[in-house]
């Protein structure tokens, strides 16, 4: 079974209009990231100042119908999967995108699980403490999803180091993951060329980091 970690950003607490949505798999191989186009016109001051400046735009910006199609195309080949998030509203946003405007949308091929147990949330905070570059990008949906993923790995695989070492930015991550993960998949996963997507997102994040550093 594939585990995915979810985060979403929304424009304000009253209208709860989606801004962006991200998913990343436990091993970092599968990545989905999308932003609404056009963006909600009435964001809160916090979202306008702290979320909108981090957005990638470009190819990540999608109309609602395109985003629904992209999400279904991403999740359907993964078949049975479990999606983790740290807030119930993230699942609501995910369902809205999955269902789209179809009167009879396809049944979702995933289960959801709220992940806030034990030391998970403190581990998320520890992740940002140990990764200042990522802390500067907090509230970018993909960055936050990666933080939740990293914290979950540390809490569930009894990693002896700190959470800062369990990230895909660590050059030793692949070796660590192969050593520490004890649950093997029964069937090989269908190959999806998300390496290109990950490369694009990495470049976008580097541009965002450079802009924030220059400011």
Image (spheres, rainbow, N blue to C red):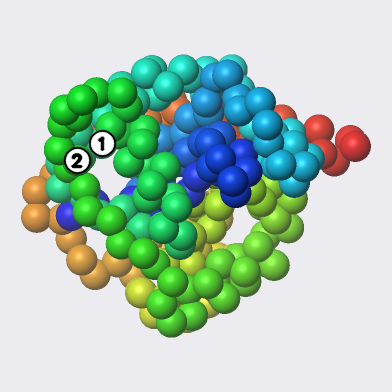
* Residue 172 visible in image: no
Q: Is residue 16 left or right of residue 185?
A: right
Q: Residue at x 24, y 23 (%)?
A: 102
Q: Residue at x 36, y 74 (%)?
A: 156
Alpha carbon separation for disc pair 2 and 1:
8 Å
Q: Residue at x 30, y 34 (%)?
A: 98
Q: Is residue 182 left or right of residue 61?
A: left
Residue under label 2: 108
The picture quadrant where one finds residue 153 is bottom left
The picture quadrant where one finds residue 158 is bottom left
Quick one: 76 or 97, which is closer to the camera?
A: 97
Please give the label number shown on residue 75. Answer: 1
Q: Which badge, 2 or 1, is on the more N-terminal residue?
A: 1
Q: Secondary structure at mark 1?
A: helix
Q: Position of residue 65 (x, y in %)?
A: 37, 18
Q: Position of residue 170 (x, y in %)?
A: 55, 55
Q: Is residue 1 left or right of residue 34?
A: left
The picture quadrant where one finds residue 127 is bottom right
Quick one: 136 or 84, which is closer to the camera?
A: 84
Q: Position of residue 54 (x, y in %)?
A: 69, 36
* Residue 165 visible in image: yes
């Amino acid at each position: 079974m594939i585990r995915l970690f979810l985060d979403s950003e929304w424009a304000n607490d009253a209208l709860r209009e989606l801004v962006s949505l991200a998913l990343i798999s436990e091993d970092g191989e599968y990545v989905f990231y999308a932003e609404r186009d056009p963006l909600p016109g009435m964001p809160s001051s916090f979202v306008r100042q702290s979320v909108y400046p981090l957005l990638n735009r470009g190819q990540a910006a999608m109309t609602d119908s395109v985003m629904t199609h992209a999400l279904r195309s991403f999740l359907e080949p993964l078949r049975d999967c479990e999606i983790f998030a740290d807030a119930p509203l993230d699942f609501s946003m995910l369902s809205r995108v999955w269902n789209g405007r179809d009167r009879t949308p396809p049944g979702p091929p995933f289960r959801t699980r709220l992940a806030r147990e034990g030391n998970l949330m403190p581990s998320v905070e520890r992740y940002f403490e140990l990764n200042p570059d990522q802390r500067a990008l907090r509230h970018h949906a993909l960055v936050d999803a990666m933080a939740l993923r990293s914290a979950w790995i540390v809490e569930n695989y009894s990693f002896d180091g700190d959470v800062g070492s369990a990230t895909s930015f660590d050059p030793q991550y692949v070796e660590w993951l192969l050593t520490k993960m004890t649950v093997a998949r029964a069937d090989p996963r269908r190959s999806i060329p998300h390496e290109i997507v990950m490369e694009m997102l990495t470049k976008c994040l580097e541009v965002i980091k450079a802009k924030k550093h220059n400011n």
